[in-house]
Amino acid sequence: MQISLRACTCLASLIAATSLSTVEAMAAKMTGDPAATCSDLIHPTDNVVRIDSASMIAPTPLAVAERGPTPAARVAPANPEFCKVLGRIAPSDPNAPRSNSR
């Protein structure tokens, strides 16, 4: 049984399109309210991982300045809305410094 190249291409396109819509639907169900999820990260804990702050950062658009010291310095990339988390991890050795993260 021979399958033409066009049939294989159509089948692959159909599978890809179906998969993408399913992934997007699953992501939409799992996200919930990003601001509530972000604010829920801060709570006292006895764990070695501590979250000091979590705040929603507004999205920024792509910006291109007219002049800059280098061509790359002229471009400020766009950023989506995100949850900025500042925290720390306590070391297992009491003499070691703690590890800060963001």
Image (spheres, rainbow, N blue to C red):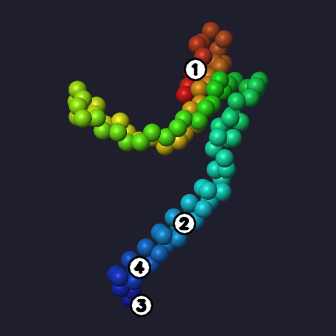
Residue type (three-letter) at the residue carrying disc 2: Ser
Can you tell which mark lies on residue 1?
3
Amino acid type for the residue under numbered disc 4: Cys
Image coordinates of residue 75 in percent, x first then y, are 31, 37
Q: Nearer the viewer, residue 86 or 64?
A: 64
| 46 on left or right of 70 | right
Q: Secondary structure at mark 1?
A: strand
Point out the tag, 1 or 4, that comes first from the N-terminus: 4
What residue is disc 1 on? 99
Which numbered disc, 4 or 2, marks the residue closer to the eye? 2
Residue 58 lies left or right of residue 13; in this view the side is right
Q: Which residue is mark 2?
A: 21
* Residue at the spot of label 4: 10
Q: Amino acid at mark 3?
A: Met
**Between disc 4 and disc 2, whose residue precedes?**
4
Q: Which of the two discs, 2 and 3, sits closer to the camera?
A: 2
Q: Residue furthest top?
A: 95
Tell me the element at label 3: loop
Q: Compute the Cα span from label 2 to label 3.
A: 31 Å
Q: Earlier in the sequence, mark 4 or mark 3?
A: 3
